[in-house]
Amino acid sequence: MCEVETITKIAKTLGVPAGEVKLNSEKIITRTNNNNTVSGFATILNVLAQESKSEIARNSTATREIAADVYQWIEFAVLYVAPGSKDKHISHQLLRDFNKLFATKSYLVGYFITLADLAIFYAIYNLVKSLSPVEKENYLNLSRWFDHLQQRPEIRQGGQVLNFTTIYLHGWAKGTHV
Amino acid sequence: MKIYTNEGNPFGLKLQLLAKFANKPVEVIKVTLNDPASKDFLVLPILELESGLKLFSTDAVARYLFPDEGALRDEWLEWSTIKLAPALSQHLSVGHRANPDALPVLNLLVRKLDDRLADLAFLTGDKVSAADIAVWSLLAPDGTLKGAQNIEHLKAWYRKITALPEVQAVLAETPLAGLTFTSLQNSNRYGGLSHVPVRVHTASESENLLADTTGNLADTVTEDELANAQKSFVHVSLPQRVEPRTVLPKAGERNVLITSALPYVNNVPHLGNIIGCVLSADIFARYSRAAGYNTLYICGTDEYGTATENKALAENLTPKQICDKYFDLHNSIYRWFGIGFDFFGRTSSQQQTEIVQEAFHDVYNNGYIFTESVDQLLCVKCDRFLADRFVEGTCPHPGCGYEDARGDQCDKCGKLVNATELIRPRCKICNSAPVIRSSDQLFLDLPKIEPQLRVWLEGSEMGWTNNARVITRSWLREGLKPRCITRDLKWGIPVPLAGFEKKVFYVWFDAPYGYISMTKHYTSEYKQWWIPSKDVKVELFQFMAKDNVPFHSVVFPSSLLATNKGHTMVTNIMATEYLNYEDGKFSKSRGIGVFGNDAQQTGISADIWRFYLASARPEGQDSSFSWNDLAARNNSDLLNNLGNFVNRALVFCEKNFNCVVPTMTLTKDELILLALINREVRGYIHSLEKAKLRDGIRHLLSISRHGNGYMQSQQPWVLLKGTDEQKARAATIIGICANIAALLANLMLPYMPTIARTLFSQLNAKPTPLNPEKPFINILLPTGHNIGKPAPLFTKLEQSFIEELKKKFGGVQDQSNGSQPSSTTTNTNSATAKPSALPNGTQSVAQLEEAVRLQGEKVRQLKASTKDKAVWQPEVNVLLDLKKQLTAAQAAPPTAPAVVATPVASDEKVKELEQRITQQGEKVRQLKASGDASVWKPEVEILLQLKKDLATLTGAPQPAAQGKNKKKK
């Protein structure tokens, strides 16, 4: 998912106007709203969070520490997840790392959905989508987190629901036991 | 607070600075990601707050420590991490990680900084902010700004920051010299920042602001290396080595016997065969000779066997005549490629008969041969015993049941099959069921030799390529079985045993002995090579593609061990993987790919082919031949890098020094250059000693790259116009470059003998022996040496020319690339199909058969290459469908043409669709090559939809068929 699309989606989730989102001549993402232009993916998300009154936004900026924690995951999404998921080795490492992370927690930061989860979710979407059912099963913790997020309509926003059912024979042989 | 960082990480410095400016005491802890204690760290450095929260993003730390510096500061922070850091890290990487595109991008970024600082004291205004610290800490290590021009504002700002007391305090703890961007590779498990795309994003050319340092390579040269470079850079006159008429091994010297797998006589070799064995062996042999080893390179054609007999029947010639005809073809192809065999023989020689029969007697007398009655398949219709390859049937191995298993091997489960065990066998030629007849055959008792073979393997497999070891081990894992070594044929070596006079030896006991017999043909002293005396050590290097490994690692060594005469056994099996053609398979029948004789007609010289094939050699994994790659290699590596350097060096020498190599006075710059070159020479020698030809090329090109960089940075053309002192400098530079050119000529010799010789004549020099003991650059052209007339060595391959060739050798390419193969089968149905000489019905059946065969092959390949059923199942379905169609077609009367579809659409529309299909196909192919299924899957769907559209338009699914017909015109 490209950065423009992700920003637009996150703005919608947060219930704030996306404004004009595009890439500038340096191929850096910019957002213009009310004649105020901000550039940089993480910086834009930060501004969106300040404008928004939604629960996710409030949770993402509750304290200075939480804001810093959230920021580092947004940067991680831009610097490692998005470009890295195009590389076979890096993407496997990323999947392993996230799977390990989610073994002990439900969300990236604290006990609630934050912008960190959204940024990583959209950045890793295509990678997760390309996984086979067996691979998804290997990354069970990551799959649980992902499936949980995609069930929220304001996050999925009409996108395809990825299949995480592990009974993958079901689609082939529908039948009932007699 | 604690900072966890790895050695040399510039971001660690950033954290230290941030903490210092925030006035917080920190403890710096050096860690590595491999420590069990750091297994949960994602990215280094990490700052641990008093609360225990660990932040791995330095910008997150900056924002945490300085929360009120505004959105503008945030933008600059993010810019420094997302844009500047990856560009720096990729520019300053060393070796294959270095990204040549990073420098122009970096120049743009630096320009942006300088512009910004023209108006402002600091990045965000008149006060130092975290953004300044972030950018400064990235520019400071590795001396990025050293030698940079036209960025006075940035430099002033840089000095201002450096002078700040906080900065000085941190630098006292952590000196800049210890920091380097290469350390980022160890800062995470994703390979540093090398995966972040770095692209020039504005149309305007980027300026040259930063000095092109190609990493900090020069800084890594040690004093020892400099001293060594100086010591070795002297003129040593080595005696020219005189090759004896007959090369024989000598005691106390290195003796290298090289063989290349014997090409089967009536297969025309394609590029894959050529690089797989003969060419690889030739390059290695040329290196080995240059290194001063006693080198003998033997090869020849393998001529006996059923296939030749069949071919002879088909062409109405005797097998001997067939062999003569094809032998000449092979010979001329290899000669054109400049393969310097010491002897290129054939297995149909008298010597072969003598050697094989003698070996048989030895093995027989030693008790390793036994007789057994064998059930053989006799095809009554064809009136002959069927060789393994001519029977197909269902695989007998439990759980496999593959229908198209061959008589010797099942392509699905990979296990060996006995032809008689096939369920429902059928003759491959006439498709009728053969009957079983029994006759006595001789067997080589491999189980009896196995213990000896295992002992031998233990001690010898170290020098083998990995695939050779793996294949051999998998053979041994199941235990060896006796192998039948005779056949009921006429074309072969008669078995010298009473009762077996009518039989001949099978390839297993025939072809490998060709190496010995050809050596015997070369010299009557062949035993010195093959059964050397105790004090002579012969190393045997055998080059082959991986399918030939079992012959050379199990069967032939076993026979030699059974002979027990102290034969030279293989010390190095050099097995390659397969070379594909533009991601498909070479196929003679489909006209896909470049075959030996085609290469000559392209007009591209043999040396370019040799260079390209060696650089695309499938070492370690399959590789692909690609026309674009060939052109790119020629234009960038040979023409722009190697050729450009050599030519510039020599032309300067000619124009300014009247063809005389000037006096050289070495300064530190030269010594660094020579030290760097010595590294590459050492790498080259190490690679070629192990026959790693690709790596050899890499080192070779690195040398000329160093040379180019040196010339570019020294600019002798400027110096030549200067003072006497500067002119003397220029003289040194030109002298050094001419000597590097001479070194390159020597290193090129194994790969491109003809071009190297041209270069030698331009240098007016002779090849110098390589010295593997002391792989250093010497003075090859002393001061006062007269060079000859320089001329360009390489020419550019234009894209249009390459496109032409691509088309010419692409065959019916559409078919091999994802389009439905069923399309060919309905060829005759198409309204636009060309009328054929054959009646419609027969053609359709023939084509169906062809399609079934091709699809079968594809399925077999797929099944062999992957276990993923999802991949091959659709292809199997296609195959079954095809077979059904074939049965139907065969049942139908031959004269009844298939339903002719009426042309329902205008030709233009069809053409346009075809055009789009071709384009989309190209796109899909490219995307697939780059991996990532999520990217190409949608494109494939578009392609399929287009094809469907076309099918509805023309009334028949047939895009590929049209392509085929067009090409036939």
Image (tube, coloured by chain):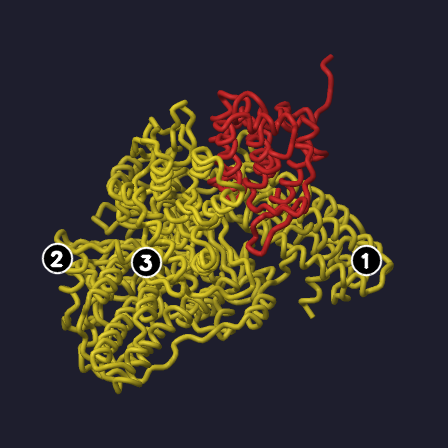
Chain colours: A red, B yellow
Q: Residue furthest toward the bottom?
A: B658
Within 10 Å of disc 2 (Cα), the crowding (few <14, some 14-19, many 20+) is few
Q: Residue type at mark 1?
A: Thr
Q: Is residue A102 left or right of residue B750?
A: right
Query: Can the viewer see residue B311?
Result: yes
Give me the C-alpha separation between circle 3 and circle 1.
54 Å
Name above or below for residue B756 compared with residue A168.
below
Give the residue number, with chain letter if any, for mark 3: B259
Viewer-nearest residue: B610 or B735: B735
Query: Can the viewer see residue B864?
Result: no
Q: Earlier in the sequence, mark 3 or mark 1?
A: 3
Secondary structure at numbered mark 2: loop
Where, by quadrant of the figure, is residue B7 drawn?
A: top left
Tags 3 and 1 both on a single chain:
yes
Within 10 Å of disc 1 (Cα), the crowding (few <14, some 14-19, many 20+) is few
Q: Is residue B399 left or right of residue B8?
A: right
Mark carried by residue B895: 1
Give coordinates of residue B749: x percent, y percent. 31, 69
Give the residue number, with chain letter if any, for mark 2: B252
Q: Residue type at mark 3?
A: Thr
Q: Name the quadrant of the C terminus of chain A.
A: top right
Secondary structure at numbered mark 3: strand
Q: Earlier in the sequence, mark 2 or mark 3?
A: 2
Give coordinates of residue B899: x percent, y percent. 84, 54
Viewer-nearest residue: B485 or B224: B224
Secondary structure at numbered mark 1: loop
